Amino acid sequence: MAHQYAQVAFTETVRKIQTELGSRSGYAGMDVGEDYNHLMSEAEAEFISQRDSFYMASVSETEWPYVQHRGGPKGFLKIIDAQTLGFADYSGNRQYVSTGNFRKNDRVSLILMDYANKRRLKVLGHVTQVDEQDWDTLALLEDDHYRARVERGFIIKIVAFDWNCPQHITPRYSEEEIIKLIDPLQSKVKTLEAKLSQSKALQQSSNNELGDGPLSLTISGIRQLTSDVRAYELRAVNGGDLPKVAAGAHLQVPVATANGEIIWRHYSISTNPARTDCYEIAVKNESQGHGGSKAIHLQYQVGHTLHCQLPDNYFSIDEEHKHTVLIAAGIGITPIKAMALELLAQQSSFELHYAGRELTQMAYADRLTRQLGDKLHLYPANQEERISLIGLLQTLEQHSHVYFCGPQTMLIELKKLAAELNIAPTRIHYEQFSAPLNSEAQPVQLTLAKSGIDISISADESLLEGVLNAGVEVPFSCQTGECKSCVVSTNSAVEIDHQDNCLTVQERESGKLCLCVSRPKSDVFVIDL
């Protein structure tokens, strides 16, 4: 005996036909020498470990062959040793034809296909079902990241295998293989798009213009508020009135990156809302940022034209509050300043608590001191002054509301204290300029129910980033949980860590979430997209 597959498959009748049709001499060498093709080498093991499906034939009591397709994640057909394979049998149809056949006849035949490279491997063996109490073996066959329910396991002792001729195999490609093929083309497209954007940006720059938004504004003045904060006064190009805004509104302004791409950045409109002749935004040059603020400080000059998006407001103030507590830290003063001026004009009851490193670095502190008088409380850190969030919340009147804008760490502390003091979340309002910090974030296997797409989301990217990186178009704007643009629904019973500032309690309970900031408390999640 030599080639094990030939010894099993080349019966007397098969050999006679080979002789009749002239192919017998080509296979004669398989009948001599030492046994081979019954122990897997590294080549077979590598091939099997990359397969995500195979075809399996069994023999019925009526002597009819039965062929079934089995699928799962890559490598779900496990290599136990050089002569043993095993796989978990997942829930599917409930005919149990193969399972029944194996009880009477343990012979099994597998064909494993690599359509993309026109390769196939045939395997003959004897199959046994794993006892349902054999937890160790079942655990060995299970795939940690494949959440289908395991019904049973099978072990296959290999009798023989053979590599088949690639002729007549039509190449087919999986989604993963297609992505690998088109990745170079997509990279080239992105490069060309970047060059086109750069060309447009350079042309705009030569004309002292930026952006393609519907609201054209001229930079009419620039003031240095602190060593790293500048205020930009913006007026209508035609000199007319600007769209009226309420306190808390923001403006999206265009910025040209180093490679010429035009990106958009949100900045609160700090002007007194009563004014319609101009807007003012204050921009802090963030040394640890993504480059947008630095580019604004370098690019924006008096006389330049910015084609901006229309103002929007996710942080408006409720005029019906009996008393309002405003809290600002650092550059977070920009929307809070406008709120204070609006409340002052309405003669409403309010107080403003403003913290910073030192008075000279606290933008608008001098103006607010003159305008607000004893309604303003300043906390310069270099003078050992600190805002006591717990003190403010403990003395908060029953119908008072809090509006906060500042660093994420301070916001987290504010929400934590409010929860501990049983202050309703509807009474704590805030605006955040970046997605909430989540040091406990875990990778998520996200399924888009309508699109039929599975996406692996890493721990350091948001659901929104993962969906966009997978090439799925979804509306979004603020990316900080303020605007509701990226809200989706889920039918999953998984608990959600909501970090948005826009959904109501009822909307959250109905299964809605913001892709940009919220995350499931599970590693598997399904959304209606």
Image: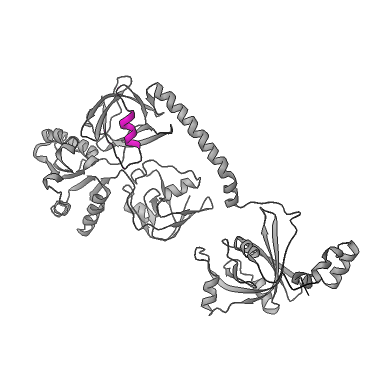
Residue at point 21%, 58% (across, down): 422
Q: On screen, 463 above or below 494?
A: above
Viewer-closest of 276 and 5:
5
Residue 218: x %, y % from top left: 32, 23
Q: Residue furthest right?
A: 20
Q: Residue furthest front?
A: 33
Asked whether residue 321 appears in the rendered view, the answer is no
Say left or right for 104 vs 247. right
Residue 42 painted magenta: no
Q: On screen, 59 above or below 258?
A: below
Tell me which colouring the rendered structure shows. Answer: one colour
Q: How many marks?
A: 0
Residue 30: x %, y % from top left: 79, 68
Say left or right for 439 vs 48. left
Residue 524: x %, y % from top left: 45, 60
Q: On screen, 344 above or below 119?
A: above
Residue 290 painted magenta: yes
Q: Quadrant of residue 160?
A: bottom right
Residue at point 24%, 40% (across, down): 331
Say left or right for 151 vs 406. right
Q: Quadrant of residue 419?
A: bottom left
Viewer-closest of 458 and 227:
227
Asked whether residue 177 appears in the rendered view, the answer is yes
The residue range painted magenta reads 282-302
Viewer-closest of 160 and 246:
160
Q: Quadrant of residue 8?
A: bottom right
Viewer-closest of 147 and 202:
202
Q: Residue furthest left?
A: 374
Quarter placement of the N terminus = bottom right
